[in-house]
């Protein structure tokens, strides 16, 4: 009899522990979280996208000089140094994730802007003259708040 009680107590404990550890569900499928990309993967993505942008900017069609490369999420204002001697135009190329669009404009009295749909494939760029009185150029990039964006800002003559 003593053995039966011990066995029953042990079985009851195992069943109770199994129930508690399994959790309760309401019958709906549980959501499965996808692993976040590692920092190494993100750096690799950045490196590949920035290399594509740099190749386009420095190519014969543009002959640009890269001033800054930026990666982040959502709308951003990206500040850069003054244009180098002899350069009069500021340009940019934008890649972004999501189904929305991006719009970028130079922060100056007469804003110059461009826009396109978010994509990692197309590498369109825009160049505009920079107002003479702009000492610290900035580019405002508007995208959806959760969109990842990669921007290369460059100077041309």
Image: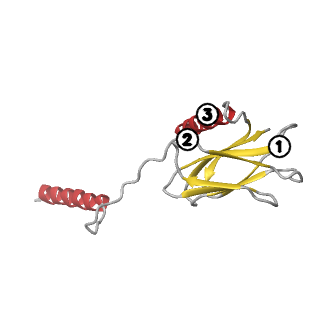
Check disc 2 and report the residue beneath it.
Answer: 42
- Residue, far left: 1
Alpha-carbon neighbours of circle 3 within 10 Å: few (<14), some, or many (≥20)? few
Check disc 3 and report the residue beneath it.
Answer: 51
Place of residue 59 in the rendered image (x, y in percent of width and height, measured from the top left): 66, 31
**120 left or right of 105?**
left
Alpha-carbon neighbours of circle 1 within 10 Å: few (<14), some, or many (≥20)? some
Which residue does the image show at 10% across and 59% down from the upper left? 1
- Mark 2 or 3, nearer chain start: 2
- Mark 2 or 1, nearer chain start: 2
Q: Is residue 151 above or below residue 21?
A: above
Place of residue 118 in the rendered image (x, y in percent of width and height, measured from the top left): 53, 52
Q: Quadrant of the C terminus?
A: top right
Alpha-carbon neighbours of circle 2 within 10 Å: few (<14), some, or many (≥20)? few
Front position in the image: 132 or 70: 132
Place of residue 15 in the rendered image (x, y in percent of width and height, measured from the top left): 22, 59
Specify the label residue 143 is tagged with: none
Spatial distance from mark 2 to mark 3, Cα to Cα? 14 Å
Q: Secondary structure at mark 3?
A: helix
Check disc 1 and report the residue beneath it.
Answer: 88
**140 left or right of 38?**
right
- Residue 16: quadrant of the picture: bottom left
């Amino acid at each position: 009899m003593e053995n039966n009680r011990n066995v029953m107590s042990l079985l009851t404990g195992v069943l109770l522990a199994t129930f508690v550890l399994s959790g309760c569900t309401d019958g709906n499928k549980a959501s499965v979280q996808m692993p976040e990309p590692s920092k190494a993967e993100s750096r690799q993505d950045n490196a590949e996208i920035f290399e594509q942008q740099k190749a386009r900017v420095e190519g014969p069609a543009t002959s640009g000089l890269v001033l800054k490369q930026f990666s982040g999420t959502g709308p951003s204002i990206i500040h850069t140094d003054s244009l180098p001697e002899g350069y009069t135009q500021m340009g940019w190329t934008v890649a972004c994730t999501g189904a929305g669009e991006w719009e970028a404009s130079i922060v100056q009295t007469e804003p110059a802007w461009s826009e396109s749909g978010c994509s990692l494939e197309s590498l369109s760029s825009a160049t505009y003259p920079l107002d003479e009185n702009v000492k610290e150029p900035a580019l405002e990039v508007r995208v959806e708040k959760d969109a990842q964006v990669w921007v290369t800002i460059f100077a041309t003559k």
